[in-house]
Image (cartoon, rainbow, N blue to C red):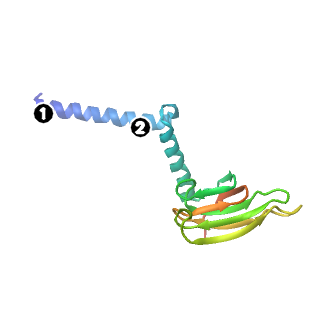
Amino acid sequence: MNGKRLVKVVGGLLLILSLFGAVQAMAEGFDLAQMTNDEIAGLLNQVTDEFVKRGIEKTATLAKGAYIAGEDLPAGRYVYTCLAKGNDWGNVTIYSDRGEGKQLMWNVVTAPEEGEEPDTIYITLNEGDQLKSGVAFSLTIMAAVAFR
């Protein structure tokens, strides 16, 4: 066997072995213990973004505060639900440009009266929009409407 042919055969075997290793690793799943904190945070962001893209309805409960779409939570369409209790109330505001731009939405939300449903608002957050809430709230990814 000449040298060039030997190199091709060995190269082909190495390629097959590396592909087999990659397939085997995918079948076994991720070894999260071997990942850095930044790698795990990046993976979580990718999974969350995929939930939004696919319209898989998931809900997150968040404390009052300011959140940037694309950093703190994925850009997308959501159902905002006020989680205020008792006499609590607050404002919900969306600003463009990480909170430095124009006001895109403003609503007052209050705790529900006995037997009433909590305040809900349908919102869209584009990359870089800032969502500010004066009360605890939940965001539910809004699945796309299926027309038949």
**How would you rate the neighbour count of disc 2 (Cα within 10 Å): few for under 14, some for 14-19, many for 20 or more?**
few
Contact between labelled residues 2 and 1, with CB atoms less than 8 Å apart: no
Q: Which residue is mark 2?
A: 23
Helix, strand or loop at mark 2: helix
Q: Is residue 38 positioned above or below 7 on the image?
A: below
Task: Indicate left or right for 4 with 131 as reference.
Answer: left
Q: Quadrant of residue 2?
A: top left
Nearer to the camera, 20 or 33:
33
Q: Which residue is mark 1?
A: 4
Q: Position of residue 98 (x, y in %)?
A: 54, 62
Q: Is residue 2 positioned above or below 121 on the image?
A: above
Placement of the N terminus among the 4 image quadrants? top left
Amino acid type, label 2: Val
Nearer to the camera, 46 or 111:
111
Residue sitting at the far top: 1
Amino acid type, label 1: Lys
Helix, strand or loop at mark 1: helix
- Return the mark for residue 66: none
Residue sitting at the far front: 100
**How would you rate the neighbour count of disc 1 (Cα within 10 Å): few for under 14, some for 14-19, many for 20 or more?**
few
Q: Residue at x 83, y 62 (%)?
A: 112
Q: Residue at x 68, y 60 (%)?
A: 133
How far is disc 1 from disc 2 in space, using C-alphas? 29 Å
Q: Position of residue 80 (x, y in %)?
A: 69, 62
Q: Residue at x 51, y 38 (%)?
A: 37
| Residue 142 appearing in the image | no
Placement of the C terminus among the 4 image quadrants? bottom right
| Residue 53 appearing in the image | yes
Nearer to the camera, 122 or 95:
95
